[in-house]
Amino acid sequence: MRFRLLLRGLWAVVPVLALLRAPPALASRPAGTGSTSNRSAGRLNHFSSLHLSQLTPTTAASINDPLVNLINGARAGKGRAPLQLLPVALVAANIAYAQSVLRQLIATKTCDHNLPAWQAFQASSTGSRMRPMSEVLGCPEARGRWNPERLLSRWLGSPLHNDILLNRPRNSHAACVQLSEAGRIGVLCSFWVAQ
């Protein structure tokens, strides 16, 4: 299985196992043990990650997350500070969590938060300098219909999602993961606070 990642407008294909190496304090569950075939495993995009060994604090700031950029545009329109990208040290744990949740949503054709998985993910951040505080889901839809601007519009039209995106001053960082599998795309954005 491989990830497609966006860096400065260029896509790179990175082996999954390199991305799923989480620091011991953050690894809440082992990564999936699915097939290594690109055809059967689906595609997962995490716009704010690369091969972890290639990243330094300076390169992390230059990585582009299109959905976080859209969210920050909406925040700027309301006079809110922009959300920063998730620090490199937390990217692998975020991907592992989001991958599990999105696979379940796509497989079951539902769009519900998995509270036990979320609570385990939050607990896994104990001892870290940051903690995941909120998440929003982009319910799985047909690959050809997925549109990030429309997704943001839906979130902003929902009082709860609007509040998470715009009105939680402690939220300082965000990361969005998009999984494309079985002809459907799902998105999970997590929002983080300093501990």
Image: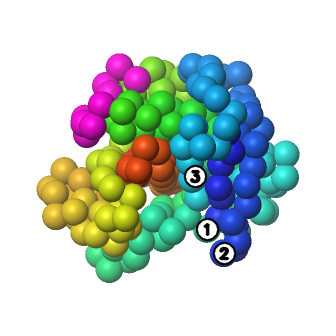
Q: In the structure shown, which secondary structural element does the residue marked by tag 2 occupy?
A: loop
Q: Label 1 crowding class (10 Å Cα cut-off): few <14, some 14-19, many 20+?
A: some
Could you say where residue 64 lies in the image, as x and y percent from the top left?
A: 61, 68
Q: The N terminus is located in which quarter?
A: top right
Mark 2 or mark 1: which comes first in sequence?
A: 2
Residue name at image x 24 percent, y 53 percent: 161
Which quadrant of the figure has residue 109? Answer: top left
Q: Residue 126 in magenta?
A: no
Tell me the magenta residue range. Answer: 108-117
**Dot in front, 1 or 3:** 3
Q: Please name the amino acid that badge 2 sits on.
A: Gly
Q: Name which residue type carries label 1.
A: Asn
Res 64 label = 1
Q: Residue at x 16, y 64 (%)?
A: 157
* Residue where numbered disc 3 is placed: 46
Magenta-colored stretch includes residue 113: yes
Q: Distance between the residues labelled 1 and 3?
A: 10 Å
Coloring scheme of the render? rainbow
Q: Main secondary structure of the magenta part?
A: loop
Q: Can residue 13 be seen in this view?
A: yes
The amino acid type of the residue labelled 3 equals: His
Res. 9 mark: 2
Instruction: Residue at 80%, 53% (x, y): give it.
Output: 55
Q: Can residue 190 be seen in this view?
A: no
Q: Is residue 39 above or below residue 72?
A: above
Mark 3 / mark 2, whichever is N-terminal: 2
**Left or right of 127, for residue 148:** left
State the residue in front, 130 or 67.
67
